[in-house]
């Protein structure tokens, strides 16, 4: 169908399922085991309700903000997703271009299909990009990669901490990985031995170090000045430890339901993190010094605004942009972002909020959030 008939981000998923090769669909859409967490990522938002305000002049609404000090036109960023060329020959560059056009930030994955330098080279002058890091057992490789990224102007490092081993994504495991197919190979050649028998995810991830530990944090701080954020935190205890270790923030995430099944949704974890870090360290959220991000299941501006109301600085979005470029290339991502912008404007007006600072906890009723 023409893009004009695509009305929301869910529509892209339905089309992608029709047009994508089976293998690519399996890799993008799969989640761990019984996919309960993947479903919960959506359901959690369905348990949060609004308490909008009326009679406030909402002629002009503004939803721009800053992430880690960098301007963004929307309180969301493009989260790191591996193997972009499985869905489209331009792979991650579709995202780089759309991020530039819409003034939002792209998080580049370690396991991009395009090379890291190609993605950076395709950014516009001044365009802000972050990097997602999988930590190699060979720390020298990681050190070189991180320092190269910093030299190339990457502004923040998101270290993925929820994947010491890849989750069982059975839809993907039923597909055979094909190392001869360029779309299935990442340019960032970190892998040595590749087991091709169990899907794309397992094949490309064998270099990741399950030995990664809190003890390694000072080492990261010694090799880069970029702000460090842990991606994949799931309880307040770890968020507190990250704060005490001097990190810049955490992403409350379950990796799009692709790792530990029966992990809670990021937005549910958010409420305990703001409560406990408030109680124990006197922090108020959103907080500039220690920023909270959430991802998983976000499909509407309405979802984003709920996370913002509960204290998140911004949220990450993964699959919707993959489905958008797999079906329509750059134009698909461009259209997805147009849709989100329209949704933000309308929702802010209906909420009676002129800017994101006016989206406060009193605007949501999250009392059902913890009843599953
Ligand atoms: C991911 N995600 C991910 N995360 C990460 O830290 N490194 C990675 O290489 C990838 N790769 C990846 C591939 C695919 C196909 C998906 C769907 C996801 C997780 C991603 O960054 C994010 O946490 C989730 O995608 C958010 O959930 P939604 O928006 O997809 O529901």
Image (spheres, rainbow, N blue to C red):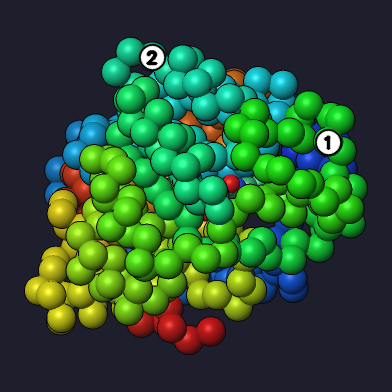
Q: Secondary structure at mark 1?
A: loop
Q: Is residue 241 above or below residue 217?
A: below
Q: Residue 97's spot in the image, x, y percent?
A: 49, 20
Nearest-to-viewer mark from 2 and 1: 1
Depth order, front residue of 338/24: 24
Residue at (62, 39) in percent of width and height: 190
> Which residue position is annotated with label 2?
124
- As displayed, is residue 96 above or below residue 178? above
Whether residue 340 sits left or right of residue 52 in the image: it is right
The residue at which mark 1 appears reads as 179
User: Which residue is located at x 42 percent, y 41 percent?
Assistant: 143
Quadrant in which the N terminus appears:
top right
Quick check: 293 above or below 90?
A: below
Farthest residue, direction left:
282
Tell me if I can see residue 48 in this picture: no
Tell me, yes or no, if residue 219 can be seen here: yes
């Amino acid at each position: 169908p023409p893009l004009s008939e695509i009305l929301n981000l869910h529509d892209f998923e339905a089309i992608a399922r029709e047009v994508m090769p089976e293998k690519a669909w399996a890799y993008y859409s799969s989640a761990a085991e019984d996919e309960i967490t993947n479903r919960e990522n959506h359901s959690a938002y369905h348990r949060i309700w609004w308490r909008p305000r009326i009679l406030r002049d909402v002629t002009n609404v503004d939803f721009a903000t800053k992430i880690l000090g960098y301007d963004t036109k929307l309180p969301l960023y493009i989260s790191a997703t591996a193997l972009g060329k499985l869905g489209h020959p331009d792979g991650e560059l579709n995202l780089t271009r759309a991020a530039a056009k819409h003034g939002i930030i792209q998080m580049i994955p370690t396991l991009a299909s395009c090379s890291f330098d190609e993605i950076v080279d395709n950014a516009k002058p001044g365009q802000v990009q972050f990097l997602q890091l999988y930590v190699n057992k060979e720390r020298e490789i990681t050190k070189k990669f991180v320092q190269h990224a910093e030299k190339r102007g990457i502004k923040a490092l998101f270290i993925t901490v929820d994947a010491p081993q890849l989750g069982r994504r059975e839809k993907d495991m039923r597909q055979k990985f094909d190392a001869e197919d360029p779309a299935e190979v990442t340019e960032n050649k970190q892998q040595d031995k590749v087991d091709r028998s169990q899907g794309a995810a397992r094949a490309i991830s064998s270099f990741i170090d399950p030995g990664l530990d809190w003890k390694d944090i000072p080492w990261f701080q010694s090799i880069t000045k970029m702000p460090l954020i842990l991606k994949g935190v799931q309880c307040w205890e770890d968020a507190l430890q990250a704060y005490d270790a001097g990190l810049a923030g955490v992403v409350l995430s379950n990796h799009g339901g692709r790792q530990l099944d029966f992990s809670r949704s990021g937005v549910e974890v958010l409420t305990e993190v703001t409560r406990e870090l408030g109680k124990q360290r006197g922090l108020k959220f959103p907080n500039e010094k220690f920023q909270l991000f959430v991802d998983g299941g976000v499909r509407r501006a309405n979802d984003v605004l709920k996370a913002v109301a509960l204290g998140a600085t911004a949220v990450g979005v993964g699959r919707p942009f993959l489905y958008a470029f797999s079906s329509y290339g750059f134009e698909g991502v461009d259209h997805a972002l147009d849709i989100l912008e329209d949704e933000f404007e309308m929702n802010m007006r209906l909420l009676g909020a002129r800017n994101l600072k006016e989206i406060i906890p009193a605007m949501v009723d999250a009392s059902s959030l913890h009843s599953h």
